[in-house]
Image (tube, coloured by chain):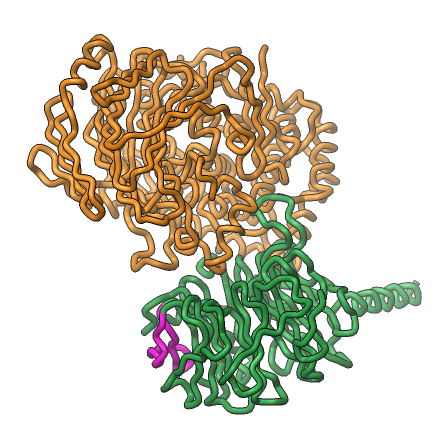
Chain colours: A orange, B green
């Protein structure tokens, strides 16, 4: 068994809880939509056992090793000692809260009274910080709610924050309901994050499994259904597809490194076997994915367009609207997914505006581009600290933020227009901004990367073909992964294998008025790679690239006429596209209107409705 | 046994008394709110942050009170409480101690976050204001409940608020200064409407003398309570000011500081300014405080440089501890 070990992301709180990705040695997934419920559940149980079996025998210690032993009733005294040892020095804020309460809830009927007392004391004496992001709050309040349920009727003197059990439970419940209302009416702010999906899933999983309040238990179950459905229809081969609110390097160019991929494997059976600590608590839990969501995740027999509406993180400066809308567009096939956000600054630091991901050639299964941008104004939009020193503050923990070679982040000078498997990306960059170049990422393992005299860059990745037409010239550089790129902001290291390998390719163009037209097709859609190339060679985008007047007219391989003028004029076949009418979910499987607090999930003749106004799940 | 318990109780009291800020200090107590020490990443093993206090004679020795890992933007002492009532404006709400820092409670719920300023009303111990990136909140029942007070505000990012002498409120916002004559029930725009106002200070000697610091436009002065404002430019080479402090004894002496400014000092009531930075190793000054008991003793809180102090009215500075910390505010409390 080959295991590659990745220490847990937040080393502070769960240093003893490793993430594992094991290549191909776990139970087989259940890809395809033909699995019966029994087959699906059988596969799920195997995968869950594969994950938990590591932790219930691991001597690494920590909360997860204790939680798995408690859940399985194994080696309980070892679990007690591991739990107590971990609690000698609690740290990690909400990243401590969820493994701590997760271990406690899995073991409270089996642990010793002494261990119980140690746990209780920790919630009195250690004061976790609430944090400042949506995922922080989801973890903080879901686990505080569960803790307050476990220890009811205690006065404020028995809690780290001076509030009584009742105050804590009420406060946490109110916030969680508020968050669910926001997410199901105008969308998540930290939406579709391959790296932060786990934080929400764990929080809701714990509620679903352990909340005593029946309403909160139901809400946890429904929200986990909601999150997994949102992921399922933008998932391919274990990868999250499309634009993302937040993603770290290196997962942006090695998609299966994201914790969300561990969830894809556990719940959908797609991607690579994983023993990630991020998925242990759900794997120990009683929640089971509705069959319809699993079928949506694995049925790629027909290509489809998924349109979604999310929201911008709270804007506190430089804007009149607290949560402007985010419009997401994703085209999904069995071979690839092409997805995008409309562009602009939608999230600080780690936005991924657009990208192509495909099934060929792990781990580098993506092509994408960006304008590497940073500014104190961007940070001031979202963070309350003083504006001018903010870049230095952020770089102290997120070292790639002001790196001109970075591969994550949004830009106010970037906009997109996507129609099925064609995307136009335009830039009108203000002179003197953080960087005066745009970059494209082309992985090292493409079968073909032809710099064609026609102007097209023609790429082949297995059965996926990608044509990239840069509107201005540029320069190619080969680059190997660097420690700065493979180590994320809070210290997740990654092995750097480079001996004898070629590097990935960066295409950099330094014109301020700029852009690219990207066409993607699969063998199933167009036939041979030669036919794809011939089709593209016969067409050229017509571009106007002047400051303040950047536009492109282009007719796609499918014959659609696209006209895009920066920043927001999008015309398809003569009809202006109005993004503001985008529903929360609009595709073949998911349907939700803005403001509805409902999600309708359909697959064939089957249907599952999540109604947060009534707290009902109807099949 | 009873005697032994009494001894134990006395021992606990003595130990607590040594650890806590004195309730009846013989001298000033300096409180600093620390946003970050060296580095603050939520979820990481951060060094201790929050509120620290020291006595001027303690040189660089600071003691901590309250939660150990909060982003503390601001600290305030309850008027007339003799140091017993302490408020912390923290990233996770308004923290309150009623026993000089021995026990604490977060008094706000989930609705109030990233509290940047807490301002108790000197006229009513049950009334406290706090400001956030989402506006102003007020309690009138001793922090049991809080309500939003944003009517009339055209921008909700409110980094600070002062309760003026006479009971008026004034808050600074991204969209200029606002004043309320009814305890925050309604806010009206003041004459200074430059964007990005950051700080407002009122002269203790002359309530109509106000100085505002701004993000991009330097310092503004009003001598009529805020009707007419004049940019104070003479001797000023910088534009971003986070801190203004009046000398409590000499009404003509004023200090100001901001982004890479070091400390500016005026000897003529903000007509002219001169930088006075000898020994000030960090020029990002976020707060300045003058000791009411010794007006030559001045403190400068810096971003990532800790606290600096001067015993000669700012002519010379030396590190006063909390090195490497991002100190957001500094308050001197005296009886």
Residue nearest the observer in this picture, B31 or A74: B31
What residue lies at 22% left-to-right and 8% top-to-bottom?
A528
Q: Is residue A308 visible?
A: no
Determine the residue positioned at 25% across, 18% down: A452
Give percent across and percent down for residue A139: 51, 43
Quadrant location of residue A215? Answer: top left
Depth check: give the residue in front, A591 or A505.
A505
Q: Is residue A521 magenta?
A: no
At x 25%, y 45%, the residue is: A596
B82 or A530: which is nearer to us? A530
A27 to A603, vertically: above or below: above
Side (left or right) of B315 relative to B218: right
The residue drawn where x is 38% and y is 31% is A228
**Magenta stretch prevailing secondary structure:** loop
Magenta residues?
B175-194
Relative to A499, is A140 above or below?
below
- Image position, residue A99 (x, y; %): 59, 37
Please, is residue B320 above or below residue A25 in the view?
Answer: below
Image quarter of residue A576: top left
Q: Which quadrant of the view contains residue A214? A: top left
**Whole-percent x and y of residue A574?**
6, 36
Figure disc tally: 0
Q: Does any portion of residue A240 appear in the rendered image?
A: yes
Answer with left or right where residue A449 lies relative to residue B17.
left
Q: Quadrant of the N terminus of chain B?
A: bottom right
Instruction: From the viewer's side, name the closer residue of B277 and B296.
Output: B277
């Amino acid at each position: 068994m080959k295991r590659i070990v990745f220490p847990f992301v937040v080393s502070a709180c769960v240093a003893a809880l490793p993430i594992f990705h094991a290549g191909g040695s776990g139970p087989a997934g259940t890809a395809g939509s033909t699995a019966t419920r029994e087959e699906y559940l059988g596969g799920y149980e195997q995968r869950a056992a594969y994950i938990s079996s590591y932790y219930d025998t691991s001597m690494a210690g920590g909360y997860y090793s204790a939680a798995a032993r408690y859940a399985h009733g194994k080696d309980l005294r070892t679990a007690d000692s591991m739990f107590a040892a971990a609690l000698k020095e609690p740290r990690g804020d909400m990243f401590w809260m969820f493994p701590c309460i997760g271990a406690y809830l899995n073991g409270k009927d089996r642990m010793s009274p002494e261990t119980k007392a140690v746990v209780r004391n920790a919630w009195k004496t250690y004061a976790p910080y609430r944090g400042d992001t949506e995922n922080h709050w989801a973890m903080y309040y879901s686990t505080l709610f569960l803790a307050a349920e476990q220890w009811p009727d205690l006065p404020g003197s028995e809690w780290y924050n001076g509030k009584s059990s009742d105050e804590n439970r009420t406060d946490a419940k109110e916030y969680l309901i508020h968050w669910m209302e926001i997410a199901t009416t105008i969308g998540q702010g930290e939406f579709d994050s391959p790296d932060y999906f786990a934080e929400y899933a764990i929080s809701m999983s714990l509620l679903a499994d352990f909340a005593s309040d029946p309403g909160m238990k139901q809400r946890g179950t429904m929200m986990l259904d909601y999150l997994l459905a949102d992921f399922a229809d933008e998932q391919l081969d274990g990868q999250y597809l499309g634009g993302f609110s937040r993603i770290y390097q290196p997962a942006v160019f090695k998609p299966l490194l994201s914790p969300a991929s561990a969830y894809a494997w556990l719940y959908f059976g797609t991607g690579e076997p994983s023993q990630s600590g991020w998925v242990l608590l759900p794997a120990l839990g009683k929640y089971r994915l509705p069959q319809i969501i699993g079928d949506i995740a694995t049925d790629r027999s027909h290509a489809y367009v998924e349109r979604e509406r999310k929201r911008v993180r709270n804007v506190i400066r430089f804007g009149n609207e607290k949560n402007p809308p985010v419009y997401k567009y994703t085209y999904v096939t069995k071979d690839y997914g092409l997805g995008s956000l409309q562009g602009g600054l939608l999230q600080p630091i780690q936005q991924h505006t657009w990208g192509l991901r495909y099934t060929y050639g792990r781990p580098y299964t993506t092509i994408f581009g960006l304008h590497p941008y940073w500014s104190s104004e961007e940070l001031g939009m979202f963070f309350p600290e003083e504006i001018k020193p903010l870049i230095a503050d952020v770089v102290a923990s997120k070292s790639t933020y002001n790196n001109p070679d970075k591969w994550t982040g949004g830009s106010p000078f970037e906009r997109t227009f996507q129609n099925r498997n064609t995307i136009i990306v335009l830039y009108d960059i203000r002179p003197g901004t953080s960087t005066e170049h745009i970059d494209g990422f082309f992985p090292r393992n493409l079968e073909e990367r032809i710099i064609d005299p026609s102007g097209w860059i023609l790429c082949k990745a297995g059965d996926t073909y990608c044509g990239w037409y840069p509107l201005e010239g540029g320069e190619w550089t080969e680059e190997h992964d660097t420690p700065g790129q493979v180590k994320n902001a809070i210290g997740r290291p990654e092995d750097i294998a480079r001996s004898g390998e070629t590097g990935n390719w960066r295409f950099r163009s330094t014109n301020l008025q700029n852009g690219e037209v990207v066409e993607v097709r699969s063998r199933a859609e167009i036939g041979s790679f030669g036919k794809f190339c011939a089709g593209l060679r016969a067409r050229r985008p017509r571009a106007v690239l002047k400051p303040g007047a950047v536009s492109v007219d282009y007719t796609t391989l499918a014959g659609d006429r696209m006209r895009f003028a920066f920043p927001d004029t999008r015309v398809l076949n003569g009809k202006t596209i109005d993004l503001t009418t985008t529903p929360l979910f609009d595709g073949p499987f998911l349907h939700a209107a803005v403001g509805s607090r409902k999600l309708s999930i359909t697959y064939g003749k089957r249907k599952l409705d999540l109604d947060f106004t009534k707290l009902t799940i109807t099949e | 046994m009873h005697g032994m318990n009494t001894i134990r109780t006395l021992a606990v009291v003595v130990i607590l008394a040594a650890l806590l800020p004195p309730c009846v200090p013989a001298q000033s107590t300096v409180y600093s709110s620390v946003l970050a020490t060296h580095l603050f990443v939520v979820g990481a093993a951060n060094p201790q942050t929050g509120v620290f206090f020291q006595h001027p004679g303690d040189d660089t020795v600071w003691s901590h009170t309250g939660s150990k890992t909060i982003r503390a933007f601001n600290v305030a002492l309850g008027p007339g409480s003799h140091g017993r009532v302490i408020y912390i404006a923290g990233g996770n709400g308004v923290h309150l101690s009623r026993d000089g820092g021995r026990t604490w409670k977060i008094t706000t719920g989930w609705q109030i976050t990233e509290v940047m300023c807490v301002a108790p009303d000197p006229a009513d111990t049950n009334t406290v204001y706090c400001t956030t990136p989402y506006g102003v909140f007020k309690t009138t029942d001793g922090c049991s409940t809080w309500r939003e007070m944003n009517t009339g505000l055209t921008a909700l990012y409110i980094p600070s608020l002062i309760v003026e002498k006479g009971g008026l409120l004034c808050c600074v916002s991204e969209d200029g200064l606002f004043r309320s004559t009814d305890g925050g029930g309604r806010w009206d725009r003041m004459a200074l409407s430059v964007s990005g106002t950051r700080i407002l200070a009122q002269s203790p000697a002359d309530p109509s003398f106000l100085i505002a610091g701004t993000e991009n436009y330097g310092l503004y002065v009003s001598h009529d309570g805020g009707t007419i404002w004049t940019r104070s430019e003479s001797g000023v080479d910088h534009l971003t000011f986070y801190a203004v402090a009046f000398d409590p004894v000499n009404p003509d002496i004023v200090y100001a500081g901001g982004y890479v400014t070091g400390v500016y000092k005026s000897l003529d009531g903000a007509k002219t300014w001169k930088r006075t930075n000898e020994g000030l190793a960090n020029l990002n000054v976020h707060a300045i405080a003058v000791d009411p008991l010794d007006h030559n003793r001045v403190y400068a809180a810096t971003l990532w440089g800790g606290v600096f102090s001067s015993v000669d009215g700012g002519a010379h500075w030396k590190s006063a501890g909390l090195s490497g910390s991002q100190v957001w505010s500094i308050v001197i409390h005296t009886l």
